[in-house]
Image (cartoon, grey):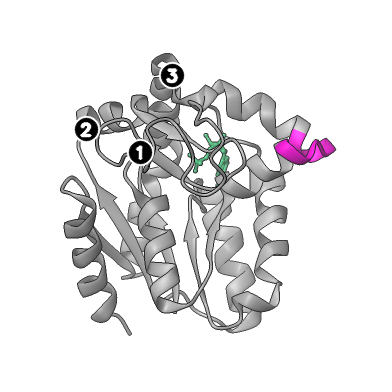
Amino acid sequence: MRLIFLGPPGSGKGTQAKQLGARLKIPQLSTGDLLRAAVRGGSELGKEARKYMDAGKLVPDDVVIQLILDRMQEPDCTAGFILDGFPRTLTQAEVLDKAFKAKRIKIDGVISFEIDERVLLERLTGRRVCPNGHGEWHIQFHQPKQAGFCDECHAPLVQRADDREEKIRVRLDAYRADTEPLKKFYGDLKLLRPVKAEGPLDAVAREIETTVGKLS
Ligand code: AMP
């Protein structure tokens, strides 16, 4: 099963991709997570990417494309994967399409997370993440076992630099300008499957599972 999760920041696609990936036993490939790992590792790529990420802007296509194509070569991707946060521009989608055609593999479906912008703002400003990359929680909607601390490594949770309100607006603008046109791209390919992403986690998860169950 090869899926793409498409949606604005804060739509819950990362959380849902992790859950569904675990259930289908396929990895969730998040370019955001890969980039944050590169930033934590202090590589040249990480240093370069950080400038864009902290500003809420998209990292240049060539950097992200290389990162994800390399990741997809790893053995755990043979049975499939869920792309989370990639592609985010038409160029990325076109390169991905070419890479898949060259390998004679196909995407089964693109789950499009439909959600109101007011809900996004509320979700993003309340999001807190583990500084060691173990996951994310919300001060109200998805609390950790001990308030303010990671369930896995118990590190104090932090707010992402790009989750501050002024950066969120930049990210939402980037989404509208660069990523939303992908709906037409995948709609034309008959791959787009819209899902209402505003309800509680479990309800959204069920809708995604039903939608994915109807694919192929
Ligand atoms: P995310 O965790 O998906 O919200 O991504 C966090 C940040 O990483 C984004 O705001 C971008 O700066 C960068 N990023 C993640 N995925 C991409 C992508 N496909 N193209 C460009 N930049 C990306």
Q: Are marks 1 and 2 in contact (CB under 8 Å)?
A: yes
Residue hosting label 3: 164
Disc 2 residue type (three-letter): Val
Distance (Cα) linking label 3 and label 1: 12 Å
- Residue 38: give its label: none
Query: Closer to the camera, 83 or 110?
Result: 83
* Majority SS type along the magenta span: helix
Label located before the other in sequence (3 or 2): 2
Q: Please report the residue visible at 55 percent of the width from the left and 28 percent of the height from the top.
A: 57
Left or right, 92 with respect to 65, comes to left
Q: Please report the residue visible at 71 percent of the width from the left and 72 percent of the height from the top.
A: 73
- The part of the chain drawn in magenta is 40-46
Residue hosting label 2: 119
Distance (Cα) linking label 1 and label 2: 8 Å
Q: Is mark 3 on a helix, strand or loop?
A: loop
Q: Is residue 22 visible?
A: yes
Query: Closer to the camera, 90 or 167?
Result: 167
Q: Position of residue 90 (x, y in %)?
A: 50, 49
Q: What element carries label 2?
A: helix
Q: Position of residue 159 (x, y in %)?
A: 48, 25
Q: Please report the residue visible at 64 percent of the width from the left and 40 percent of the height from the top.
A: 36
Q: Can residue 61 be seen in this view?
A: no
Q: In this view, does 81 lie above or below 166?
A: below
